[in-house]
Image (tube, grey):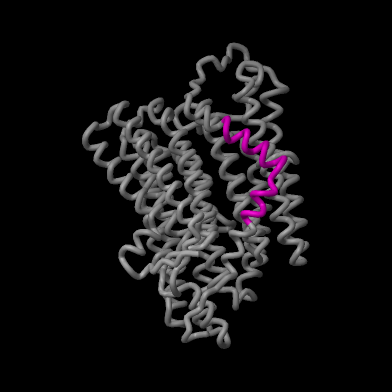
Amino acid sequence: MNTLDLMTPLGALFGLLPEVILTITACIVFLVAGWRGSTPAGSRLAGWISLAGIVLSGVALAYLWLGGFTPSGIAHMVALDPFRYAALGILLIAVGLTIVISLGYMERERLLAPEYYGLILLAAVGMMLLAGAVDFIVLFLGLEVMSVAAYVLVAFNRGNQASVEAGLKYFLIGAFASAFLLYGIALLYGATGTTNIILVGVQLSSGSVSILSALGVGMLLIGFSFKVAAVPFHMWAPDVYDGAPTPVTGLMATGIKAAAFLALIRVLMQGLAPVEALWQPVISTLAILTMVIGNLVALSQRSIKRMLAYSSIAHAGYLLVAVWPGSRLGAAALLMYLLAYGITTLAAFGILAMLGRGGERDVTVDDIAGLASQRPWMAFAMAICMLSLLGFPGTFGFIAKWLVLSSAVFEGQWLLAVVMVLASVVSAGYYLPVIMAMYMRDAEPGVTYSGVTVWGAAAGVVAVAIVGIILLGLWPPDLIDLSMESAAALFQRSLPVAIQ
């Protein structure tokens, strides 16, 4: 086991090596943007450089993880534990898939600004800081770096009114949510005298909970609820997801949501565990509302992109079920679910990006009728994605949902488990019609899919994702063990000698 002093400049850079690599890569991409300009060649070059940065960051992450580096004391602001490493791995996969899907999409839509890829990398840096923070200052810094880049990405298609409108809505609601989160941090600092998440937990466990602490917890929960699009704080998500460029929508529904959930569970497990009686009822209520309303509203959607937006809200409810127990199994289930949902959703958005034009807002279930007869592999891939999101046995999504259900049942929370099962049954009402349209209906007269552009790189990663969904659905034990080992880090608190 190697120790690393994060209070020294060299130690801090080494501990943040994955984030540092992505930051340097983003700077290189911006230089490429100034050098090559908004040309197809410049855009492709920026995309491939960004993808290389993701790979190098993944190598650095593997070195930290396999090297077993741990901080040499409590005086640090970023975690060096397996949970952070697993979290960063999930985020890098989501960002890498987004970049590959974007390569062909941006050229087809004539959005040839290479800065797009630099913004994705900066958003990734923010996500990674958010997911690995053990201090509220770093948590808020990561949140803002991620959010500011995301605001621009959502409105990146300036020629599309829906994209510009979505960017404005996201900016206004995002700023509002950040204010709640910052106010909650300030109140907890006033009550405990520290911004370190672990030390906040120590202070809260040492005496009765003050009104100041309770208000701080409430403000934090409101801020995080906005970020994960939990009902009733979800009103921004459908319009923003619908208006953003499709690869950006995929990144928001997976990477950005995953980062917020990973930060939330660390705050609850390590900082607010002593006051779980305050937040558990709130989490369970939010989970039930989000599962029920997200699925019911998704039933009425004909646009596939908007249906996936409401589906994303429903899945936030399932993830909240994993958060509620405050247990090792719940944290492991969260990691598994984020990975399964991320791979499946990005594959679905990748297929949707190939099928549509101009943001894909108008691609409905009726528009893909007969797809299986003309594009059988594309239809098969979309069908696997829908079944995995539904939680059909034999897919990775089923394994993830089973773990989430187990985490609730083991803690005796039968209400959440029952609601989750019923909500999943309801979701069949909008996932299965997509499959039925592709396989059981004929295309409209004169409609062909011969003009659908299939980009080699995007098709390759979608194919790999589909294979992964099937294989991990049939044989997931090693991944389950890894997620359990990573989740255990949240419950191994190292306290300063003065407090011990």
Q: Residue furthest front?
A: 1
> Where residue 363 sits in the image (x, y, percent)?
55, 29
Report the residue that reaches farthest toward the left.
35
x and y percent of residue 427 in the render?
70, 43
Q: Is residue 482 magenta?
A: yes
Q: Magenta stretch mostly in which secondary structure?
A: helix
Q: Is residue 204 above or below residue 104?
A: below
Residue 258 shown in magenta = no
38 vs 229, left or right, is left
| Residue 317 visible in the shown view | no
Give the residues drawn in magenta, as a range.
463-483
Residue at 65 percent across and 52 percent down: it is 293
Q: Nearer the viewer, residue 388 or 48?
A: 48
The location of residue 72, given as percent across then percent down, is 44, 71
Q: Position of residue 442 (x, y in %)?
A: 68, 17
Q: Name the residue rendered at 50%, 60% in the picture.
A: 68
Q: Of residues 38 and 438, which is closer to you in this image?
A: 38
**Residue lying furthest top in this view?**
446
Q: Is residue 435 left or right of residue 43?
A: right
* In the rendered image, the vertical position of residue 137 relative to residue 16, given as above or below: below
Q: How many marks?
A: 0
Query: At x 32% / y 68%, what residue is drawn?
Result: 8
* Nearest the eye: 83 or 11: 11
Q: Residue at x 37, y 39 (%)?
A: 50
Viewer-side residue, 361 vs 264: 264
Q: Inspect this view and state whether residue 178 appears.
A: yes
> Quarter-wise, where is residue 306 in the image?
top right
